[in-house]
C-alpha cells in the first residue's frame, strides 16, 4: 500500500493466527530496529525499515524494498536448459550478494566468539533426528555426524570472528532489482553469530539445488564462486564445512520439499556425504573462488 507521507510503499505482514505468529513478528520488528541502529545508511533501501508493530492485532508494518525473488530468477535463468546462457548474470548476482554480506557483517561486527562444540553438536543432533524421520538413512547420517563431530571438537574454544546474521539467508528471502540484492524476512536474525553463518546457509541450499537435474550446476557454481570471492576468502574451510552441513540438514528436514521421493532422499544422502568428506560439488567451486578448501585440522583464526 502507498505511504501518504513518503515516496515508498508499505507492506503489512498480518498473522492469520496472532497467538501463534505474534512472537516471530515481534522478533522481526526488533531485528530490523537493531539492524537500522547498527548499519545506518550502509544498507539503505536493501533492508525493510520497521514502521510499526501492532501487538494486539498481530500486524507488522514495513517499508517495501521491491525486487524479484532470487528463487524465481534461479528457476528461470539457472536451469539445465538456459543456465549456460546466463553465466554472466549469475556472476553479477554472486558478486552483489557477496558485497551485501560483507557490508552487513562489517557494519554489525561483534567480538570474536569461542566455538562451542557441545552446543553445535546438540543442534546438529536435533537436525539429524528430523532428517532421519523423513527417510534419510541412519548409516548416511551416522557418517555425516562422525565427520562433523570430529571437526567441531578440534575447534573447541577457538575464537571465531562474529557479526550479525540474517539467520535464513536463502533465495526465497532475497529479492533482486536487476542484480542489486534486497533482503527480507529477518525473523531468524541473530545479533551475533560466526561470520560465515549466512554464507554457509546459502551455500548449503545451493549445493542441494545443484544436485537436481533440472538445474545447471555450472550456473549455480558461478553464483557460489563469485559470492565467496566477493565476500571473504580466508574462512577456515573445515569450520565452514560443518556449518554448511548443519544448514543442509535444516533445509532437508524443514524445507518445502521435506516430503520427498526415495530417489530424492538418496540424492540428498549422497550430497551430504560428499560435503562431509570434502569431495562435493561445493568444494570444486570453492577452489575456483580462491577460498582455501583443503581439509585443515588446526584452527587458523586469530
Image: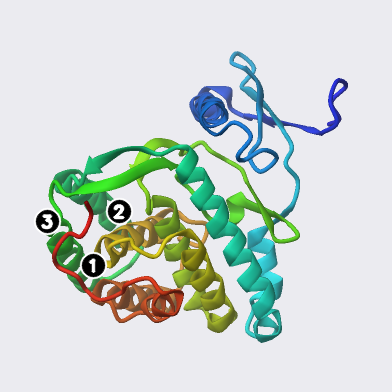
Q: Is residue 183 left or right of residue 189?
A: right
Q: Which residue is mark 2?
A: 127
Report the mark closest to the observer, 1 or 3. 3
- CA distance for labels 3 and 2: 18 Å
Where 54 sits versus 131, above or below?
above
- Dot 1: few (<14), some (14–19), or many (≥20) neighbours within 10 Å? many
Whether pointer 1 and pointer 3 mark residues with C-beta atoms closer than 8 Å, the reply is no
Figure disc tally: 3
Quarter of the image for the N terminus: give it: top right
Q: Residue at x 48, y 56 (%)?
A: 255
Nearest the viewer among 126 and 114 is 114
Where 271 sits versus 300, above or below?
below
Nearest the viewer among 104 and 193 is 104
Quadrant in the picture for residue 289? bottom left
- CA distance for labels 1 and 3: 18 Å
SS of the residue at dot 2?
helix
Q: Earlier in the sequence, mark 1 or mark 2?
A: 2
- Dot 2: few (<14), some (14–19), or many (≥20) neighbours within 10 Å? many
Where's residue 253, x and y in %? 39, 57
- Dot 3: few (<14), some (14–19), or many (≥20) neighbours within 10 Å? some
Single out the residue that lies furthest toward the top: 56
Q: Earlier in the sequence, mark 1 or mark 3?
A: 1
Q: Which residue is mark 1?
A: 141
Would residue 166 be seen by someone viewing this image from the given angle? no
Numbered badge on residue 186? none
Report the mark closest to the observer, 3 or 2. 3
Q: Earlier in the sequence, mark 3 or mark 2?
A: 2
Where 246 sits versus 291, above or below?
above
Q: Which residue is mark 3?
A: 153
Q: Residue at x 88, y 21 (%)?
A: 4
SS of the residue at dot 1?
helix
Nearest the viewer among 259 and 267 is 267
Amino acid at each position: 500500500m502507498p505511504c501518504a507521507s513518503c515516496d515508498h510503499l508499505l507492506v503489512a505482514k498480518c498473522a492469520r493466527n496472532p497467538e501463534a505468529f505474534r512472537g516471530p513478528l515481534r522478533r522481526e520488528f526488533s531485528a530490523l530496529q537493531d539492524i537500522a541502529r547498527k548499519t545506518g545508511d550502509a544498507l539503505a533501501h536493501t533492508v525493510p525499515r520497521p514502521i510499526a508493530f501492532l501487538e494486539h492485532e498481530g500486524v507488522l508494518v514495513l517499508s517495501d524494498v521491491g525486487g524479484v525473488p532470487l528463487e524465481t530468477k534461479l528457476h528461470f535463468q539457472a536451469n539445465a536448459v538456459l543456465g549456460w546462457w546466463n553465466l554472466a548474470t549469475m556472476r553479477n548476482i554472486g558478486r552483489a550478494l557477496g558485497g551485501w554480506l560483507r557490508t552487513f557483517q562489517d557494519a554489525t561486527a561483534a567480538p570474536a566468539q569461542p566455538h562451542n562444540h557441545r552446543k553445535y553438536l546438540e543442534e546438529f543432533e536435533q537436525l539429524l533426528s528430523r532428517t532421519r524421520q523423513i527417510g534419510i538413512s541412519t548409516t548416511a547420517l551416522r557418517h555425516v555426524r562422525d565427520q562433523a563431530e570430529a571437526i567441531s571438537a578440534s575447534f573447541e574454544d577457538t575464537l571465531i570472528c562474529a557479526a550479525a546474521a540474517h539467520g535464513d539467508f536463502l533465495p526465497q528471502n532475497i529479492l533482486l532489482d536487476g542484480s542489486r540484492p534486497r533482503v527480507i524476512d529477518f525473523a531468524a536474525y541473530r545479533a551475533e553469530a560466526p561470520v560465515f553463518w549466512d554464507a554457509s546457509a546459502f551455500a548449503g541450499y545451493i549445493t542441494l539445488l545443484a544436485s537436481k537435474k533440472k538445474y545447471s550446476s555450472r550456473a549455480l557454481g558461478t553464483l557460489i564462486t563469485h559470492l565467496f570471492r566477493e565476500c571473504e576468502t580466508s574462512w577456515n574451510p573445515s569450520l565452514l564445512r560443518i556449518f554448511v552441513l548443519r544448514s543442509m540438514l535444516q533445509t532437508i528436514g524443514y524445507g518445502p520439499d521435506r516430503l520427498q521421493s526415495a530417489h530424492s532422499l538418496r540424492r540428498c544422502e549422497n550430497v551430504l556425504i560428499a560435503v562431509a568428506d570434502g569431495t562435493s560439488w561445493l568444494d570444486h567451486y570453492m577452489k575456483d573462488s580462491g577460498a582455501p578448501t583443503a581439509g585443515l585440522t588446526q584452527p587458523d583464526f586469530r
